[in-house]
Amino acid sequence: MEKLIERILEELDENPKRQGLAHTPARVAQTFRFLTRGYQENIEEILNGALFEVSYDEMVIIKDIEVYSLCEHHLLPFFGKCHVGYVPSNKIIGLSKIPRLVDMFARRLQVQERLTQQIADTIQEQINPQGVGVIIEAQHLCMMMRGVEKQNTQMITSTMLGKFRQDQRSRMEFLDLVRAGS
């Protein structure tokens, strides 16, 4: 990867050997490996058995999970917050595991729509809750720094499954609780 970064610098009419750039190819390669580490992670290792049987059927919400990802179209960052809610059937997920799932999918080349869907689908597959809701609010540098250059634009995506899709009261409760305190 370092040779490719060096070549990019040359294509930009830069000298990759000059003092300020001499170590840039190695730093950029290391950065891209870090920012895409989600490809080396898997759901079973992330969850690590932290699925617990409980008799609880009220809404569980983890909100304001920080999200950092790379737009697959421009390789520029997008960042924001993710809110995840579910109504258990008979299992819950350990609290720290949901932000880890979010990070696993976010640390891949992404589009926000697919990221939102992957998080919801994974929770649905792992614990089969009565419903799952995922909302991501993010700003995209590909839209802020280039193209239309709109600094205050935010993209919001949602995926609602089961009870959150079928039952208006559950959906509204989730949305109200996500908005509370924001």
Image: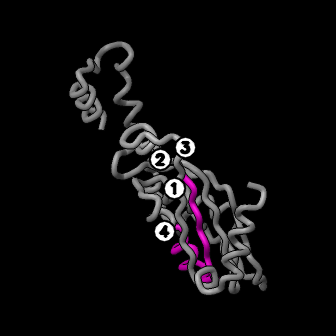
Label 1 near label 2: C-beta < 8 Å? yes
Question: Residue tagged by mark 4?
Answer: 118
The answer to which of 78 and 17 lies nearer the viewer is 78
Q: Amino acid at mark 3?
A: Asn
The residue sitting at 35% across, 46% down in the picture is 74
Whole-Å distance between the Cαs marked 2 and 3? 10 Å
Q: Amino acid at mark 2?
A: His
Label 4 near label 1: C-beta < 8 Å? no
Q: Earlier in the sequence, mark 3 or mark 4?
A: 4
User: Where residue 35 sits in the image (x, y, percent)?
Assistant: 46, 45
Q: Is residue 95 visible?
A: no
User: Where residue 131 sits in the image (x, y, percent)?
Assistant: 63, 81
Marks 4 and 2: which is nearer the front?
A: 2
Crowd rating for badge 3 (residues with CA inside 10 Å; few <14, some 14–19, many 20+): few
> Secondary structure under badge 4?
helix
Q: Earlier in the sequence, mark 1 or mark 4?
A: 4
Whole-Å distance between the Cαs marked 1 and 4? 17 Å
Q: Earlier in the sequence, mark 2 or mark 1?
A: 2
- Coloring scheme of the render? one colour
Crowd rating for badge 2 (residues with CA inside 10 Å; few <14, some 14–19, many 20+): many
Marks 1 and 3: which is nearer the front?
A: 3
Question: Residue tagged by mark 2?
Answer: 140
Question: Residue tagged by mark 3?
Answer: 152
| The N terminus lies in quadrant | top left
Label 3 near label 2: C-beta < 8 Å? no
Marks 1 and 4: which is nearer the front?
A: 1
The residue sitting at 58% across, 81% down in the picture is 165
User: Where residue 128 sits in the image (x, y, percent)?
Assistant: 60, 83
**What is the magenta range?**
119-138
Marks 3 and 4: which is nearer the front?
A: 3
